[in-house]
Image (cartoon, rainbow, N blue to C red):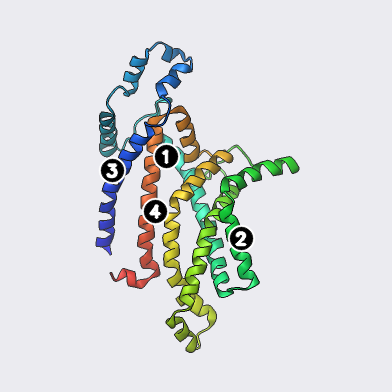
């Protein structure tokens, strides 16, 4: 098991390198130029510099390969993602300030998705072709069809029109007031969690139906074991492995949904930071955010792979 973990960690290194190159190049291919934006702001400081001087000051006059060499060397030897072109703040400190908000939203969304999807998926499989099964399947199709950003927009618009209520826009950190923080995070987490639960629910139902047809389930019933014990001890554990794989593959979707919902509910997370940086063409910030998101997705998939051993003992023996 330790060899497997080490092998997977080493395999992440070339993936991270390739991802960093792709992100670094694509970000700079976005239409628009940060220097033109700065000069168009009529800022007194920038008006004192010509375009060429400003390019040199920001380090953008160098070839792209040299800019990448400077960036990757700072990352590898100093754990430094550069500085914001606009604020001059460290990108690492900016991300460290925003990351807990996005992490909390994603964690709550996953917990809500699993709490909803797994029990309903198991129920739908056990009650196959009943009214309850049709109702749960219709619910999952509805959640698949309706985008989370539309639900978030409707939640903020209609209550304010009908009842004069709108979500709190002043963010309260968890460390200051846990209850106020959870109240503010609950609505976007539920919206994101329900969106994620739809496909997880359908996968759980499909795998449960397949497992319930296996010979060892019939053997367990022949031994006189209770239906609940058969479901918990034999059926659910074997059906969850593909479901966990699916959850890991949904990590980019989860992060993408968090970006949009953070904008709608004015949550100071990575999504809001990314959108502001894209609008300003703040290359170091955009590159840093995408790089951290990419690393997060890789680590989530690694955790998913390692969690197989906790569910299926046969995996631990390999």
Q: How many dots with numbers? A: 4
Separation of marks 4 and 2 at Cα, in angstroms: 27 Å
Q: Which residue is tagged 1?
A: 96
Q: Is residue 279 above or below residue 255?
A: above
Separation of marks 1 and 4 at Cα, in angstroms: 18 Å
Secondary structure at badge 2 equals helix
Q: In front: mark 1 or mark 2?
A: 2
Q: Is residue 134 above or below residue 157?
A: below
Q: Which residue is tagged 4?
A: 300
Q: Position of residue 191 (x, y in %)?
A: 58, 51
Separation of marks 3 and 1 at Cα, in angstroms: 21 Å
Q: In front: mark 3 or mark 1?
A: 3
Which numbered circle lies on residue 17?
A: 3
In primary-sequence order, the first of circles 4 and 2 is 2
Secondary structure at badge 4 equals helix
Residue name at image x 45 percent, y 58 percent: 247
Which numbered circle lies on residue 139?
A: 2
Q: Position of residue 208 (x, y in %)?
A: 49, 72
């Amino acid at each position: 098991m330790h060899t497997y973990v080490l092998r997977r960690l080493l395999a992440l290194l070339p993936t991270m390198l390739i991802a960093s190159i792709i992100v670094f190049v694509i970000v700079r291919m976005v239409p628009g130029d940060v220097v033109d934006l700065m000069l168009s702001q009529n800022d007194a400081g920038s008006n004192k510099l010509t375009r060429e001087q400003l390019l040199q000051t920001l380090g953008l006059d160098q070839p792209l390969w040299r800019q990448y060499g400077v960036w990757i060397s700072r990352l590898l030897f100093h754990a430094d993602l550069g500085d914001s072109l606009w604020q001059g703040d460290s990108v690492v400190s900016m991300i460290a300030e925003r990351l807990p908000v996005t992490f909390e939203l994603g964690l709550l969304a996953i917990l809500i998705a699993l709490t909803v999807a797994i029990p309903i998926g198991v129920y739908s499989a056990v009650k196959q072709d009943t009214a309850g099964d049709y109702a749960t399947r219709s619910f999952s199709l509805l959640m698949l069809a309706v985008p989370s950003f539309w639900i978030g927009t409707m939640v903020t618009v209609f209550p304010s029109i009908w009842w004069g209520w709108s979500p709190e826009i002043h963010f309260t950190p968890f460390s200051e007031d846990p209850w106020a923080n959870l109240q503010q995070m609950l609505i976007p987490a539920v919206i994101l969690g329900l969106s994620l639960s739809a496909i997880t629910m359908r996968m759980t139902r499909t795998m449960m139906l397949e497992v319930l047809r296996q010979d060892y389930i019939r053997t367990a019933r022949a031994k006189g074991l209770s239906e609940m014990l058969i479901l918990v001890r034999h059926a659910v554990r074997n059906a969850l492995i593909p479901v966990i794989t699916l959850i890991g593959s949904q990590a980019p979707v989860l992060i993408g949904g968090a970006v949009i919902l953070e904008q709608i509910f004015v949550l100071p997370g990575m999504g809001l930071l990314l959108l502001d940086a894209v609008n300003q063409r703040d290359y170091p910030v955009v590159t840093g955010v995408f790089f951290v998101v990419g690393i997060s997705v890789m680590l989530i998939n690694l955790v998913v792979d390692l969690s197989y051993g906790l569910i299926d003992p046969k995996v631990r023996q390999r």
